[in-house]
Image (cartoon, rainbow, N blue to C red):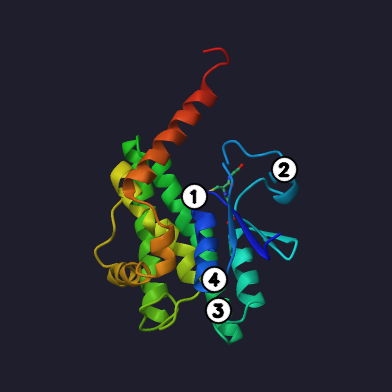
Amino acid sequence: MPAIELFSFAACPFAQRSRMVLIEKGLDFELVEIDIHDRPAWFRDISPYGKVPVLRHAGRVVYESAIINQYVDETFSAQPLMPADSYGRALARIWMDYCDTRYLPATHKLMADREHPQRRAEAQAKLTEVLRFIEHEGLRRLGDGPYWLGAAPSLVDFHYLPFFERFAVYQELAGAEWPGDCTRLRQWYETAGQRRSFIETRHTLDFHLDQQRRMQERRAAAARPAGN
Ligand SMILES: N[C@@H](CCC(=O)N[C@@H](CS)C(=O)NCC(=O)O)C(=O)O
């Protein structure tokens, strides 16, 4: 058994977070591709939630992308991706939590409400508020950049990158708008988006649009009465 295995799915943004962190840390790992729409029975024994990503290291299993990434960073000390001081680490965790509890729900709502003009407008207003909070309470206060927490890349960058990669999908399918004053956020994406770990794991807009189309088809098939 290889020392480090990552159970992953190419289209999964959460698995992408962990793939990027393993690459950033310069670690050798085996990538095990799981088709999450047709999971092998044995995967249940490895993944308590049935989800990717899952990391297996020295025979032990860790799951949830944010926890995997902190585990990897703490276990392998080369190329640290968390601040050395406890307050810096607290800030990093605040911003990773903000991604999962504020930014992602705002993007999901916009996508879910895209066919309903009134609800779509409300969802866009909420997304604008969230992006402005990141810009003004986050990036502009945390330092001079170019990365989220300052001069060096951190776990926070790899936490957000897959979901800003998908912003083009929200624009294409839901008319998502990027507020004009969110210039630091744009610069952040341009700089962090040059990391080799991102370039090696990202996908094209066409790939993402195809994934969205397949998801719609699966939902429609699941909603159809049996036999139709
Ligand atoms: N909170 C989890 C989310 C992981 C997740 O939702 N993975 C999706 C693929 S992108 C999955 O495995 N879905 C399968 C399922 O829910 O059954 C994390 O950060 O790792």
Between disc 1 and disc 2, whose residue precedes? 1
Question: Do the residues bearing badges 3 and 1 touch, measured as CB atoms within 8 Å?
Answer: no
The label nearer to you, 4 versus 2, is: 2
Residue depicted at 39% across the width and 75% down the height: 139
Per the model, the C-alpha gap separating discs 3 and 1 is: 26 Å
Q: In terms of secondary structure, where does tag 1 sit?
A: loop
Question: Measured from the top left, where is residue 168 in percent x and y?
Answer: 32, 51
Q: Which residue is mark 3?
A: 82
Q: Quadrant of residue 116?
A: top left
Q: How much space separates mark 4 and mark 1, taking CA atoms?
A: 27 Å
Mark 3 crowdedness (10 Å alpha carbons): few <14, some 14-19, many ≥20: many
Residue drawn at (57%, 83%) of the image: 87
Task: Give the structural element (helix, strand or loop) at label 3.
Answer: loop
Q: Amino acid at mark 3?
A: Met
Q: Residue at x 55, y 16 (%)?
A: 225
CA–CA distance between discs 1 and 2? Answer: 19 Å
Q: Earlier in the sequence, mark 4 or mark 1?
A: 1
> Which one is earlier in the sequence, the residue at label 4 or at label 3?
3
Q: Residues within 10 Å of mark 4 (few under 14, many from 20)?
A: few
Q: Is 154 located above or below residue 56 in the figure?
A: below
**Amino acid at pointer 1:** Ala
Q: How far apart are the alpha carbons under marks 2 and 3?
A: 34 Å
Residue at the far top: name it.
227
Q: Distance between the Cα atoms at labels 4 and 2? A: 35 Å
Q: Give the number of the disc on residue 42.
A: 2
Q: Which residue is mark 1?
A: 10
